[in-house]
Image: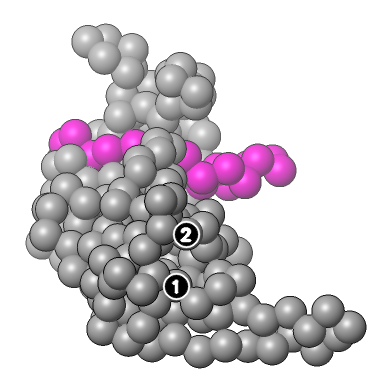
């Protein structure tokens, strides 16, 4: 396989999933270098801020994002190094599989969130609580037990996203594009309100975090 085909980027996050035993955890590292046809250098995964012990010869399924593709291949640990910092030599892939991610592909999630609306008719002292049930790089679907706004309202969605083993709280500016009520049959006749959001993110770091979170969940859904 040619390096130009892989288009490796130093600093990119990769996912490592053990192939041996019953350990199906998805670990994360970053590409720090490579020699085509020889090895791929990645930082050693961490767990609870501690460097994990990765044995030489351990097989992994490796996945990473490249543009609008999820690339996957099998690899083994050629060498585990501790100096000058913890990193791994992985065998360079001979074959790979890829999945094309369609634009704005949504993934199902369950994220606790809050929504703040600039519309005076829907303002309150505290942001309204809600649940994000699906999300993409361009928008999300939010469910709440009350209507949180009207179409075209400018809002801010706040939630904690877990990506590459870390958590980051994002406050995402957005526009409310649709609202509809869903009546749940039963004695209580509960009503859930679904809110379709279109993101309007300007902060580049927040954009990268959101893309990483969405793509990581796409990878997870494809590998299960």
In terms of sequence position, does the residue under pointer 2 or pointer 1 come before the other? 2
Residue 27 shown in magenta: yes
Note whether 53 is above or below 135 in the view shown. above
Q: Is residue 134 left or right of residue 99?
A: right
**Quarter of the figure that contains the C terminus:** bottom right
Gap between marks 2 and 1 measured at Cα: 7 Å
- What residue does disc 1 label? 148
> Between residues 145 and 54, which one lies in front from this camera angle?
145
The residue at the point 17 percent across, 48 percent down is 205
Q: Are marks 2 and 1 in contact (CB under 8 Å)?
A: yes
Q: Residue at x 40, y 36 (%)?
A: 166
Within 10 Å of the Cα at label 1, are there few (<14), some (14-19), or many (20+) other Cα atoms?
Answer: many
Quadrant housing residue 99 = bottom left
**Residue 154 lies in the magenta-colored region:** no
- Where is residue 116? Give x, y as percent: 35, 60
Magenta stretch in the rendered image:
17-36
Crowdedness near tag 2: few (<14), some (14–19) or many (≥20) residues, C-alpha within 10 Å? some
Q: Nearer the viewer, residue 145 or 171?
A: 145
Tell me which residue sits at (49%, 65%) in the image: 132
User: Horizontal placement of 156 versus 195: left or right?
Assistant: left
Observer able to see residue 67: no
> Measured from the top left, where is residue 2 in percent x and y?
16, 60
Relative to 192, is 144 above or below? above
| Along the viewing direction, whichever of 82 and 127 lies nearer the viewer | 127
Residue 16 - label:
none
Residue 84 placement: quadrant: top left
Question: Which percent across, then down, holds residue 197?
Answer: 34, 76
- Residue beneath label 2, please? 128
Q: Circle 1 sits in a helix, a strand or a loop, which is it?
A: loop
Q: Is residue 182 left or right of residue 91?
A: right
């Amino acid at each position: 396989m040619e390096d130009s085909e892989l288009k490796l980027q130093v600093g990119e996050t990769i996912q490592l999933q053990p192939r041996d035993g019953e350990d199906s955890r998805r670990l994360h590292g970053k590409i720090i270098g490579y020699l085509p046809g020889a090895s791929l250098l990645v930082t050693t995964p961490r767990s609870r801020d501690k460097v994990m012990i990765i044995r030489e010869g351990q097989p992994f399924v490796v996945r990473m994002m490249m543009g609008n593709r999820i690339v996957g291949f099998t690899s083994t640990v050629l060498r585990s190094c501790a100096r000058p910092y913890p990193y791994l030599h992985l065998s360079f892939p001979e074959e790979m599989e890829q999945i094309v991610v369609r634009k704005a592909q949504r993934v199902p999630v369950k994220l606790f969130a809050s929504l703040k609306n600039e519309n005076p008719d829907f303002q309150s002292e505290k942001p309204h609580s809600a649940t994000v049930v699906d999300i993409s790089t361009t928008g999300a679907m939010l469910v709440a037990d009350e209507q949180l706004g009207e179409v075209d309202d400018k809002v801010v969605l706040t939630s904690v996203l877990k990506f590459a083993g870390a958590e980051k709280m994002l406050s995402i500016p957005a526009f409310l594009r649709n609202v509809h009520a869903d009546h749940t049959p039963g004695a209580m006749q509960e009503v859930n309100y679904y809110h379709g959001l279109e993101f309007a993110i300007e902060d580049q770091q927040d954009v990268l975090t959101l893309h990483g979170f969405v793509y990581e969940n796409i990878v997870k859904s494809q590998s299960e």
